[in-house]
Image: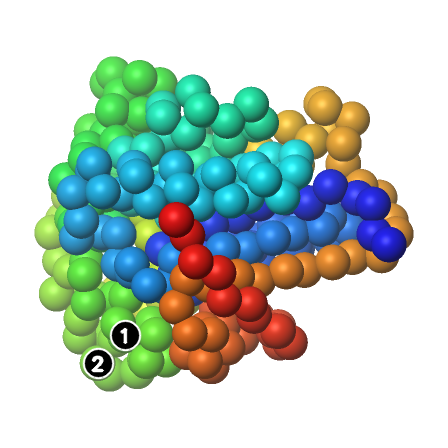
Amino acid sequence: MNKKKSIGIFDSGIGGLTVLHSIISTLPHENTIYVGDTARVPYGTKSARMVTQYALEIGKFLSDQQVKALVVACNTASAVALPKLKGVFNIPVIDMIGPAARKAAHSSISGNIGIIGTEGTIRSGAYERSLKEINPDLSVVSSKCPLFVPLAEEGWVDNDIAHLTATCYLEPFIDSGIDTLILGCTHYPLFKETIRKVMGDHITLVDSGEEAACELKELLEEMGEKEEGGTIERRYFVTDTPERFLKLGQRFLGEEIDQVSHIDIP
């Protein structure tokens, strides 16, 4: 039996699999448990109160699995539920906002940073607050890009429709003087090449999942709990039927998903 503790990761659906991909790439020997709240997706259009409730419920499920760290692989949940999660669960909690904001603040030379995300993430102002706490002199421009999510799930991330959509969404940034753009939704890394074509190669793209994975690695090293070998177990749970998750999951994760289990979150 595999005795290693797992890392718990959750998202409103399948987008968090891009974060899991970054975690697997950065920490290949760790056990992982992923929960996609597919029965209640999307989080980005829901109230902060409801998203916080959902996050606490899934956090409880993962905590009961004895995970050694909890990764909130959802920008909206990170933006509104992080204080509650940290206050309730006695395990380290890694979010999407802080790591990406720190990377962007340190990467930007001009001090002009752009943010794209869901309606809920942008409305929360969480990235702006985090950036201003790091450096009050930073200039921040943000915009919501809701159509990126269905396009990503359709697999239309680098075609004419994706390019036209990205051009419309990113137009406010082109003449804004930004040199760094935060991809503030877990679906958005699939659009990196399209975004680069629109914005140009001189713009630094900050992937919140990649930065969260790096901070998770540092945390586990400090805790003395980073695994260096042994057998690996990957478990997947969804709150609705698994068929769509299985169909789309490989596109987001970059590798095959063999089995997904259904759970009821009370």
> Is 144 in front, or is 198?
144
User: Is residue 217 among what the camera can see?
Assistant: yes
Q: How far across and how far down the image is residue 206, in percent?
A: 41, 46
Question: Disc 1 or disc 2, which is closer to the eye?
Answer: 1
> Is 85 in front, or is 266?
266
Mark nearer the N terminus (1 vs 2): 1
Relative to residue 126, is residue 5 depicted above or below? below
Tell me what residue is drawn at x 71 percent, y 23 percent.
Answer: 222
Q: How far across and how far down the image is residue 177, in percent?
A: 20, 41
Q: Is residue 61 left or right of residue 196?
A: right
Give the labeled residue for mark 1. 151
Tell me what residue is drawn at x 59 percent, y 40 percent.
Answer: 64
Q: Is residue 75 left or right of residue 208?
A: left
Residue type, mark 1 in image = Leu
Q: Is residue 190 left or right of residue 213?
A: left
Quarter of the image where one finds residue 57: top left
Residue type, mark 2 in image = Ile
Give the labeled residue for mark 2. 161
In the drawing, what numbered circle is on residue 183? none
How many numbered discs sit on the rendered protein? 2
**Pointer 1 and pointer 2: residues touching (CB < 8 Å)?**
yes
Q: Is residue 6 left or right of residue 186?
A: right
Q: Secondary structure at mark 2?
A: helix
Instruction: Give the crowd class for mark 2: few <14, some 14-19, many >=20 residues within 10 Å.
Output: few
